Amino acid sequence: FLAGRHEHGREGFLYGPTFATLFSPFAILPDSLGAMLWNWFNVAIMLYALLRFYREVLAVRWPQFSLGQFLSLTAIGAAGSLWSAQSNAAIISLILLAGVEIVNRRFWRAALFLAIPVHIKVWPIAAGMLLVALRPKALALRYVVCLAALAALPLVLVSPAYLAEYYGMWGDTIVTRQIEPRHWGGIGGGYRDGWTLWENLVGPVNKRVYSLVQLSAAA
C-alpha cells in the first residue's frame, strides 16, 4: 500500500485503504513484533470495551448480572477471533463503545466508533444504520461526516489518483466475493452462511431466489 502497489482479490488484500493506513504502524515493523502488537491491541480494546459496556450499560440495568459471568460468556464467543488475529474483535469492540457513548450522550464519539468499522469491513454499516435509526437527529449527520473524513484519511499517505483506484479495486473485490460461483472452497474453507449450506447440501444456488431470501432476512 505504501509503495503504491495493491493486490486485491481472492488471494490478495481484502480491506479498504483506511484500514491499510491505520494498520501501517503494525505492518512496517518486523512480522514477529507487528503481529504480536496487533494481537495485544485486539485483546486490549476488547477488554476495555467490555468493561465499559458492562459498567456503564449492563450493570446499571441488570445489577444481578456479575462482571465475571459477562466476561466468561464473551470470552467464549471472542476466542476464535482473538486466536486467529482477525479484525472482528476490534470491530465488535468499537460498536460496543459506540453504544456506551450513545448512552452517555457523547454523539460525536459514538459516530466515530461506528464509522471506523465500516472502513475495515463493510458489514458493520448494519450496526451503524440501526443505531442511527434509534437516534437519527443526534447521529445521522455526525455519522456521515465521520464516514467521509475516514474515507479521506489515506490521503496523508497516498495520492488522490491512487486512492480512487484503490477504492475501485476494493469495491470490485467485495462484489466479486458475493457473486463468484463458489464461496471460498465450500464448507471446508469458506463462509458459514446460507449460500455455502445450500450449495453443499442441495446443489447449485439460484442467485435470484437467494437474493430474495437475503432481502427478506434484512427486512
Image: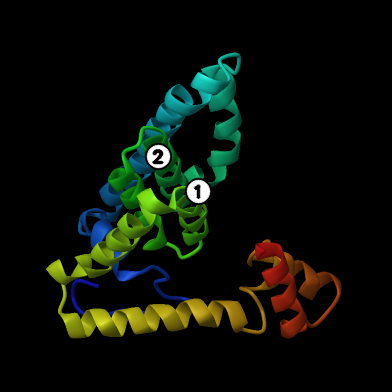
Which residue occupies the extreme top position in the image?
64
Check whether the beta carbons of the residues at disc 2 and disc 1 lie within 8 A of each other.
yes
Q: How packed is label 2: few (under 14 Cα within 10 Å), some, or many (20 or more)?
A: some
> Tag 1: residue type?
Leu
Q: Residue at x 35, y 36 (%)?
A: 105
In the displayed structure image, the side of residue 31 where residue 92 appears, left or right: right
Which residue occupies the extreme right position in the image?
202
32 or 83: nearer the viewer: 83
Residue 155 coordinates in the image, percent (x, y): 16, 71
Q: Is residue 191 above or below residue 48?
A: below
Q: Quadrant of the C terminus?
A: bottom right
Residue 205 coordinates in the image, percent (x, y): 77, 81
Residue 106 quadrant:
top left
Q: Residue at x 70, y 63 (%)?
A: 217
> Tag 2: residue type?
Ile
Residue 122 in view, yes or no: yes
Residue 195 coordinates in the image, percent (x, y): 72, 71
In the displayed structure image, the side of residue 43 where residue 76 appears, left or right: right
Q: Residue at x 50, y 48 (%)?
A: 134
21 or 219: nearer the viewer: 219
Q: Secondary structure at mark 2?
A: helix
Q: Which residue is mark 1?
A: 134
Q: How is the image coloured?
A: rainbow
Q: Quadrant of the N terminus?
A: bottom left
Q: Give the number of the disc on residue 17.
A: none
Disc 2/disc 1 C-alpha distance (Å): 10 Å
Q: Residue at x 60, y 14 (%)?
A: 64
Residue 117 coordinates in the image, percent (x, y): 40, 56
Q: Which residue is mark 2?
A: 102
